């Protein structure tokens, strides 16, 4: 009995010793100091330098083949970094001018064209400003203008802050017409407006293009309308918005003396173009039984209809797409919102749902009192200081100005004008805070 008690006691002592040893080991592990956390502001650690390669044979006396090391294979760049690497090549040295020589994958550029003659300098600059303020991707501006305006364009664009000028490049072209009588083309409708018909011929190295009139304002990134190019089917090569949403009160359906697209015609103030397709297409027409290339068709078409057209180049485009309807993609009115969409009552359902995306202040409404809502938006973008806060210096003053326009039909629907621009400003603010300031530095 005594032996059994002694054995049990020894067994209990052994178990207690094992338990104490385990607890001691656990305590030592818990007491080990954790690695220090790097502060958010600390610079990233540099990787340890790679060991120097041994020189090859012949570099040192007595060096043999055993001293040679095999060079590790160079890692291939990932596809997602190609764009970033190309963007670095665009960085300017101080004082270096921007040019089209910068290397960037063509699909990353947005090409925007405008034609400005006469007193359209300010309007054009405000339009370009609206594009730069809200857009994300880099843009190339193709500015067609008279020789007398070229120095002023250069001067004004070079004065913009570098934080914005790094988002675009520009090139200024003279007004030229490759076929027909240049003076006749220049006087068609408005000064130089017919130049847009010749863009596929002049911009031979550009695949796709967004053309806008000088009196257009972007209320959301240009990137968004550029994406509509992806929706083209295999036959479509251009895109425009309808001239009117209600055909029976539209201009073309009531007054046109020439063929026009669809039931209400199209407005050419905002026009997406796949220039590659336009240059290679053969267009049906009313002059000969076979198709004609774009450049070969323009002057004969004008000669046939010049006494029947009222709106110049826009009428010619309507005639072209009347005979070639399969070539046109029609986008909603929110991408080309004009006074006609609200001055007789709101009739652009897409803008009511999603807000105005591109504002088109035709008929000079930015410069008179006929449509104060349009004028308020134009002046808000024109007068906005580049480096100021968008909400404080543009959006809130714009809301106050809109209160003064509620007596007008367009002013009664301020949400239609403000919805997209508010979304755009919020995205720009969030991008600045999250990406540029950083989540660890926000309070």
Image: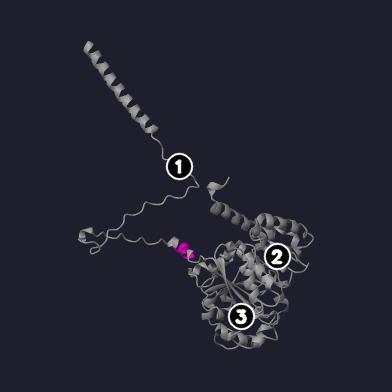
Q: Which mark is residue 37?
A: 1
Q: Which of 224 and 136 is in front in this view?
A: 136
Instruction: Please identify the quadrant where the N terminus is shown.
Output: top left
Label 3 vs 1, first from the N-terminus: 1
Which secondary structure type mostly characterizes the magenta part of the structure? Answer: helix
Q: Around disc 3, counting alpha carbons within 10 Å, would you say few (fewer than 14), some (14 to 19), or many (20 or more)?
A: few
Q: How far apart are marks 1 and 2 (CA)?
A: 51 Å
Sequence order check: which comes first, mark 3 or mark 2? 3
Q: Is 30 on the left or on the right of 285, as rendered? A: left
Q: Residue at x 57, y 67 (%)?
A: 168
Which residues lie in the magenta part? Answer: 82-87
Q: Which residue is the site of mark 3? A: 174
* Residue count near mark 2 (Cα–Cα under 10 Å), binned few <14, some 14–19, many ≥20: many
Task: Locate residue 119, reporting x and y percent.
Answer: 71, 75
**Is label 3 in contact with label 2 (beta carbons under 8 Å)?**
no
Q: In this view, does 216 lie to the left or right of 82?
A: right
Question: In the image as oriented, which residue stretches furthest toward the front?
Answer: 61
Where is residue 274? Give x, y as percent. 54, 74
Name the element at disc 2. helix
- Disc 1 residue crowd, few under 14, some 14–19, many 20+, Cα 10 Å: few
């Amino acid at each position: 009995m005594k032996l059994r008690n002694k054995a049990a006691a020894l067994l209990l002592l052994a178990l207690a010793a094992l338990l104490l040893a385990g607890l001691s080991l656990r305590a030592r592990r818990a007491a080990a100091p954790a690695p220090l956390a790097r502060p958010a502001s600390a610079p990233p650690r540099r990787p340890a330098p790679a060991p120097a390669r041994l020189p090859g044979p012949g570099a040192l006396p007595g060096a043999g083949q055993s001293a040679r090391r095999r060079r590790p294979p160079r890692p291939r760049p990932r596809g997602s970094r190609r764009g970033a690497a190309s963007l670095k090549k665009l960085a300017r040295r101080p004082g270096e001018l921007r040019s089209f020589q910068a290397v960037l994958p063509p699909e990353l550029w947005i090409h925007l064209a405008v034609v400005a003659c006469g007193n359209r300098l300010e309007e054009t600059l405000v339009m370009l400003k609206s594009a730069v303020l809200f857009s994300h991707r880099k843009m190339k501006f193709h500015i067609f203008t008279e020789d007398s305006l070229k120095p002023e364009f250069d001067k004004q664009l070079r004065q913009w802050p570098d934080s914005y000028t790094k988002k675009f490049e520009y090139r200024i072209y003279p007004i030229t017409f490759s076929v027909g009588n240049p003076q006749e083309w220049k006087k068609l409708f408005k000064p130089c407006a017919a130049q847009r018909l010749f863009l596929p011929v002049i911009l031979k190295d550009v695949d796709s293009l967004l053309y806008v009139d000088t009196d257009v304002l972007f209320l959301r990134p240009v990137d968004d309308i550029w994406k509509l190019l992806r929706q083209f089917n295999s036959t479509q090569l251009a895109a425009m918005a309808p001239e009117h949403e209600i055909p029976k009160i539209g201009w073309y359906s009531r007054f046109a003396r020439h063929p026009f697209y669809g039931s209400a015609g199209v407005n050419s103030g905002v026009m997406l173009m796949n220039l590659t397709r336009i240059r290679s297409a053969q267009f049906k027409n009313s002059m000969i039984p076979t198709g004609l290339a774009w450049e070969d068709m323009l002057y004969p078409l004008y000669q046939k209809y010049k006494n029947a057209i009222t709106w110049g180049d826009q009428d010619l485009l309507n005639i072209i797409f009347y005979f070639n309807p399969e070539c046109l993609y029609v986008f909603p009115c929110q991408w080309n919102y004009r006074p006609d969409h609200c001055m007789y009552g709101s009739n652009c359902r897409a803008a009511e749902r999603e807000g105005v995306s591109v504002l088109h202040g035709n008929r000079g409404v930015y410069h008179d009192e006929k449509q104060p809502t349009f004028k308020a938006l134009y002046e808000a973008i024109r007068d906005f200081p580049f480096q100021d806060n968008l909400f404080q210096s543009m959006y809130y003053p714009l809301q106050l100005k809109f209160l003064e326009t509620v007596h007008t039909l367009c002013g009664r629907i301020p949400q239609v004008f403000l919805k997209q621009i508010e979304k755009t400003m919020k995205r720009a603010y969030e991008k600045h805070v999250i990406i540029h300031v950083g989540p660890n530095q926000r309070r």
